[in-house]
Image: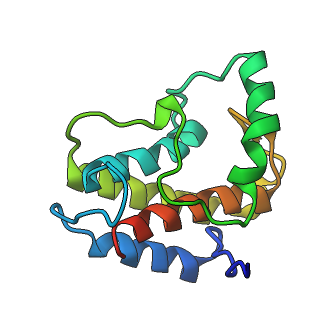
């Protein structure tokens, strides 16, 4: 299987493409697969950035971090795309309705902040779940997750 080149969340042109795709979403956009509504998907994508910037999610305990490193890290930080209908961690499950515009604007702001901070800010930065990651691993995690869910909604 040929894996397409990963977009780079630290490059302005790639961020502009992600933002353009996000701006194509509508409040009534329907998923091509999965159970999330578009507003829930945006809130779900924001969780990844909340874990980096907002200090509102607790760090998993030592045993859970070890399990995450052993069982999930490779899949999350590699360039291999996620399969459809993959399960997710409990903190990423969004229930109920969310404010579409608020979640959309938050996601765009997080993407811009990440791009502005740049690769050097993320090289060796610790992830709540996986420990220290390289800037390439951070990029793969951010870009792959965004692409997966934007593709889920056909944009």
- Residue 59 point in image, percent of width and height: 65, 23
Q: Which colour scheme is used?
A: rainbow
Residue 20 figure quarter: bottom left
Along the viewing direction, whichever of 85 and 55 lies nearer the viewer: 85
At x 59%, y 65%, the residue is 143
Q: Which residue is drawn at 64% across and 59% down?
A: 117
- Residue 13 coordinates in the image, percent (x, y): 55, 83
Task: State the image coordinates of residue 111 (x, y, percent, origin top left).
Answer: 50, 61
| Quarter of the picture holding the C terminus | bottom left
Residue depicted at 56% across the width and 40% down the height? 53
Q: In this view, does 49 lie above or below 54?
A: below
Location of the N terminus (image quadrant): bottom right
Residue 33's image quarter?
A: bottom left
Residue drawn at x 38%, y 75% is 21
- Left or right: residue 73 compared with residue 21: right
Q: Is residue 4 above or below residue 100?
A: below
Provide residue 125's location: percent of width, then percent of height.
Answer: 77, 44
Q: Is residue 64 left or right of residue 43?
A: right
- Please state the total of marks drawn on the protein image: 0
């Amino acid at each position: 299987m040929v894996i397409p080149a990963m977009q780079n969340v630290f490059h302005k042109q790639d961020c502009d493409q992600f933002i353009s795709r996000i701006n194509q979403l509508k409040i009534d956009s329907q998923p091509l697969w999965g159970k999330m509504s578009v507003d829930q998907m945006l809130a779900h994508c924001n969780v990844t950035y909340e874990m980096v910037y907002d200090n509102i999610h607790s760090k998993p305990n030592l045993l859970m971090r070890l399990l995450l490193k052993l069982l999930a890290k490779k899949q999350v930080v590699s360039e291999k795309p996620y399969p459809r209908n993959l399960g997710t961690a409990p903190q990423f499950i969004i229930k109920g309705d969310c404010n579409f515009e608020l979640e959309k604007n938050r996601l765009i702001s997080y993407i811009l902040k990440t791009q502005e901070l740049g690769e050097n800010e993320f090289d060796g930065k610790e992830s709540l779940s996986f420990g220290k990651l390289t800037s390439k691993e951070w990029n793969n995690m951010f870009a792959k997750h965004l692409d997966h869910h934007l593709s889920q909604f056909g944009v």
